[in-house]
Image: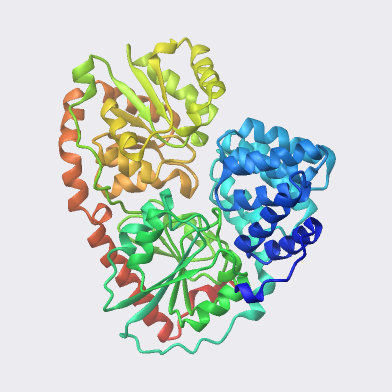
Amino acid sequence: MTPDERPNLTDDPAQLVTEGLRLHEDGQLEEAERLYVRALELEPNNFKALHALGVIKSQLGDYPAAEELIGLALKLNPRSALAHMHLGIALWRLRRPEEAIVHYQYSLILKPDNADAYMNRAIALHGLGRQEESIANYDKCLSLRPDHAVAHSNKIFVLDYVPRLGFEEHQAERRRYYEVQAKGLEGSIPEHGNDRDPERRLVVGYVSADFRRHSAAACFGPVLRRHDRSRFKVICYSGVLAEDDWTQAFRAVSDEWRTTARMSDEKLAEQIQADQVDILVDLSGHSEGNRMLVFARKPAPVQVTAWGGGGGTGLPMIDYMFTDPVHIPAWARPLFAEQAWDLPCNITFEAPDYAPGVEGLPAVRQGWVTFGCLNRYMKVTPRVLELWGEILKAVPGSRLLLKDGALDDPQLQERVRGRFASQGIEAERILLRGMTSHRDHLAAYNAVDIVLDPFPHSGGITTWEALWMGCPVVTLVGNKPSSRISGAILQALGQGGWVVEGEDAYVKAAVSRAGDLAGLVKFRREIRGVMEACAAGNPKLYTLAVEEAYRSMWRRWVEGETPGSRHR
């Protein structure tokens, strides 16, 4: 909106807020913010303006400002269910989930049918590792609003963390997502008039809200940076609101850039079709910010899901899914809506320039073995903690180093140490580290001899990072894609001896490897060379495999093969 097009508002705070809310709803956040600020200049204690401005700050990633503004609003109206919910969202983003849950509960007391409050409480419970409670809250949200596609995606995402659920249950829930959220969109699928030349330069569109500092970007970034631009035109459809230096780097390596966070699904689908995209790639799966309902409209003739969420989407409109034979075994593939397409590994890795060198084995230097896990703590289940306690008891003098931003919370630290104390493990053997710079995060591996992978959700990029820093990873492959990522990486690198099945084998492998210091020294010395020589860990070779896949998919479409149609 240009200055000449702005509404001619009086200096009436109520009118300013009303017009601001309209602009806010329309996605014009900066214009709405201007009106809310003006309203507060005229009336500092305007509840609606404080609350709405706090919501905008939260949407733009300024969570401290959001907390302050919404907190002031609640002092004026402590019985606002929406304000309690939005304060909870800001607190969750500020890594204060326990406080967030308190405000979600207030919101639900005041407005028991608030589906969004149930969804946001589910998000916080997931972050605390309380997965069954999280799913129960998503189910309550969906009982109130069955068409809540965001909550449905979030529930699917949380299933990765539930030990009792496997391939069958995961794909059944994805089919339900398709049936409830997306099936009615099939009538909007267009006829594709793309040039059918099988060898021409292809237009590849990448859709993600993670073109920013994010683990998913570390998965797909190596490919986007290496595309052969003479053979592939790259368009990025970015759902990022709070851009950063990684966003700018992705913008620089794309041929065209579309900012889409405030674009409706229908409008985005129309834009993709207008761009004549040949192959449209989903980089999110059912993670935050996904655009599943855009892909359901099939705006491109060939659609692929890749890297950002490896468990499949449930949408028959998505033709292919990048994976590998370990990540999704042959017997499970008929359960998926998409056709599996194998790459050298389900994800690849590129070490950052600032990654430190690998130091000598800590056990040789210190006289004891240090196990470690630098994954997000939400992946660590109570059963994992029990097994880690067994490993520590079986390896005298050993330590366990855990590192994640969540461990900056003193209450969580106390609970973690308490769990190990109940198994007779002294507090000084549990080393807890919180948030640091990424370089320092990588450097922390120089204090670790062996990494213990969590389950049922294994590491991904975290596993690659551990290996790059010389740390072998003991991993237990399980009954769902999320429990097989580390196993896929290790098998692709020829390190299958670190991959086990079953809890007893997991404990035995960790204990026996801890007794082989010479083997650990050798691993530490050689693993970077192994990674660079293998297509799975060599981004240049990996990208060539991706490009060959795109060309083969395109040729199939030109010849009339549409794998997704077999599910309809």
Decide which of 536, 128 is in the foreground and name it: 128
Q: Position of residue 389 (x, y in %)?
A: 44, 19
Rendered position, 33 above or below 194? above
Residue at image location 38% in from the left, 55% down from the top: 246
374 left or right, relative to 496? right
Residue at image location 58% in from the left, 56% down from the top: 171
Decide which of 231, 456 is in the foreground and name it: 231
423 left or right, relative to 98? left
392 left or right, relative to 72? left
Q: Position of residue 176 (x, y in %)?
A: 66, 59
Rendered position, 474 above or below 160? above
Residue at image location 72% in from the left, 38% down from the top: 72
Q: Position of residue 488 (x, y in %)?
A: 35, 48
The quadrant of the rendering that contains the N terminus is bottom right
Rendered position, 568 above or below 25? below
How many badges with numbers are in the image?
A: 0
Q: Is residue 293 visible?
A: yes
Residue at image location 36% in from the left, 74% down from the top: 255
Q: Is residue 122 visible?
A: no
Snapshot quadrant of residue 426: top left
Decide which of 84, 512 is in the foreground and name it: 84
